[in-house]
Image (cartoon, rainbow, N blue to C red):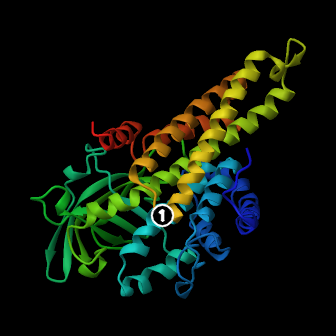
Amino acid sequence: MKRTLYESDHEDFREAFRRFLEVEVVPHHLDWEREGIVPRSLFTTAGKSGFLGMDVPEEYGGGGVADFRFNAVVAEEIARSGAAAAGLGLTLHNDISLPYFLSYCSPEQRERWLPGIVSGELITAIAMTEPGIGSDLASMTTTAVRQGDHYVVNGAKTFITNGINADLVITAVKTDPTQKHRGMSLLVLERGMEGFERGRNLDKLGQHAQDTAELSFTNVQVPVTNLLGSEEGQGFTQLVTNLPQERLSIAISAVAAARTALEQTLEYVKERKAFGQPIGSFQNSRFVLAEIATEVDIAEHYVDDCVRALNAGELTAVDASKAKWWCTELQGRAVDRCLQLHGGYGYMNEYPIARAYADARITRIYGGATEIMKEVIGKSMGL
């Protein structure tokens, strides 16, 4: 079934971004995998090429077009390139961090931060998760105590994507520790603030080119002017408001990764022979790939409708949760079955399917685990 989500402008943008990946990312991806981090120059090069802040107003250097279809193109092409881990920092910067700056910054904050975010000079991250609490954000213990024109921040965060490279970290804190959700605020911590330390670059199962770090805060003095929103206590509402876009972004990447695995495997089974014939000619191979192709097509059309809903301001938390859990589970299932069709070669890291298998596992966890997504959906049904 023909996709109708994109127009000619999006396809032109896709072609330009695909060339960018072929030149600036793919040749270096394996080196970055070994190093455990992408260079900061990847962000500045992407910024110069117009691939950051597409929806930032032109007065701050952005594209001035609030159309999430451009973000979807970026996510799809990163998955297609086979360098998902290297590109994850770009999608987090554009899809997950940026909406907080666009929605909640004061005019002064916009002047201070948006131009650097668009140029890639200011790399962003968002720090919610703490050691030991997982998805239970209301139980966080990182505090921000106001003292005059500063907050004093103490605590720790973990599993922070872009954690090593980030210059601006949107940090969930308790400005009123006596409250749960209503005591939460978002502060922007900046590189170089005394007492703001980065721990180790975490050694992960997959996504090796993506820096994922532990952060610690010891009496960090953060200006009150770095508070996102007009007053304290808005943090939980801000997070809930922006989570649907984050989860949709993950779903888009997941479906694109599943399609990429399918295409790679189709090519492989047509060439690889066993018992004197291509393994793709065996009935089992045809059935497996037919099932994956069907599931990917169905998921892709649902996600396309979610993109339309987001652009119209109508994407609900429930629909985004459906997209997130279904598509990431599909990604894991599809990549696993495709790896099986590669036989022993699928277990070798020199084959893209092996790296895709390791990279896929986290998508069912970050951005809200599958179980949390089902809770959101179940509660919406009155259960």
User: Does any portion of residue 350 appear in the rendered image?
Assistant: no
Q: Which residue is mark 1?
A: 165
Q: Which residue, as the protein is rendered here, is positioned at the far top? A: 275
Query: Is residue 369 shown above or below 74?
Result: above
Quadrant containing the N terminus is top right
Quadrant containing the C terminus is top left
Q: Quadrant of residue 295?
A: top right
Give coordinates of residue 9: x percent, y percent. Answer: 72, 69
Q: Nearer the viewer, residue 242 or 152?
A: 242
Give coordinates of residue 205: x percent, y percent. Answer: 50, 37
Left or right placement of residue 96 versus residue 303 in this view? left
Query: Is residue 298 shown above or below 166?
Result: above
Give coordinates of residue 341: x percent, y percent. Answer: 71, 23
Badge 1 amino acid: Asn
Q: Nearer the viewer, residue 61 or 142?
A: 61
Left or right placement of residue 325 versus residue 232 in this view? right
Q: Residue at x 74, y 60 (%)?
A: 18
User: Does any portion of residue 163 appear in the rendered image?
Assistant: yes
